[in-house]
Image (cartoon, rainbow, N blue to C red):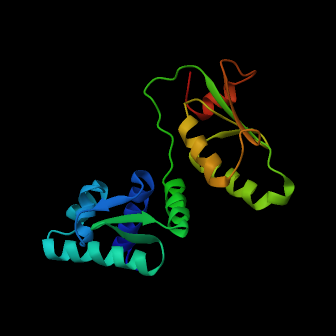
Amino acid sequence: MKRDNKEITRLILKGLLITGAVAVASTSPMFVSMALPKVTKYLSDKIKDKRKKNKRFCNTFYYLKRNDLINFENHGGQIYISLTKEGRKKAGKYQIDDLEIKKPKKWDRKWRILIFDIKNKERMKREALRGKIKELGLFQLQKSVWAYPYNFTNEIKLLRSFFGLTEAEMQVIIASYIENDRGLKNNFKLS
């Protein structure tokens, strides 16, 4: 699949994950473009020819259907497009891949500390989580203790859900003081 097609697939799956099932008033998936504006914008930025844009959009939907990532269901003349179990899994992975923590202009002088305790039999899950935490830019204080100066509650909830962890296995602490935090502040370029 071409890079553009992969990006369209990614946007459609993520859009369906966020919006849930999309009701379509016609048998043409082009009506979905109103419900998934990021897909429409991406296509508009990349492809100027309207026919090519429509064809690419439709082809991507049929690709997703053929690969059992989305369902089309007809309920009383209304068509609903939704993710299959496999589609939700793939969309969730895309959502995790694109995850980033927004940094406010000013630090509120509070540390967010992430701690997790994942059993040794789930070592692969633990290592994948650790890799994503590093990628997000958290600072490792100890093996399963990480710190970050900005709010990451929503991102951690998403990670917890994606990895199938409980609040007991993965917790967030908000602290106004960490002993000897000079190295931590230097890492995040804070004063």
Image quadrant occupied by the N terminus: bottom left
Residue 54 seen in the figure: yes
Image location of residue 14, percent across then percent down? 43, 58
| Left or right, residue 61 beside residue 109 | left
Q: Is residue 128 above or below residue 166?
A: below
Image location of residue 25, percent across then percent down? 23, 63
Image location of residue 183, percent across then percent down? 68, 30
Outermost residue to the right: 120
| Left or right, residue 36 beside residue 155 | left
> Which of 72 and 122 lies nearest the eye of the viewer?
72
**In the figure, residue 123 lies in which quadrant?**
bottom right
Image quadrant occupied by the C terminus: top right
> Which of 147 and 53 lies nearest the eye of the viewer?
53
Outermost residue to the front: 76
Q: Residue at x 61, y 30 (%)?
A: 186
Image location of residue 8, percent across then percent down? 35, 67
Q: Is residue 178 above or below residue 47?
A: above
> Which of 119 and 185 lies nearest the eye of the viewer?
119
| Left or right, residue 144 beside residue 78 | right
| Left or right, residue 62 beside residue 167 | left
> Which of 41 and 165 lies nearest the eye of the viewer?
165
Q: Residue at x 35, y 64 (%)?
A: 80
Q: Residue at x 69, y 18 (%)?
A: 177
Residue 49 seen in the figure: no
Instruction: Give the total number of marks visible in the rendering.
Output: 0
Q: Residue at x 30, y 66 (%)?
A: 76
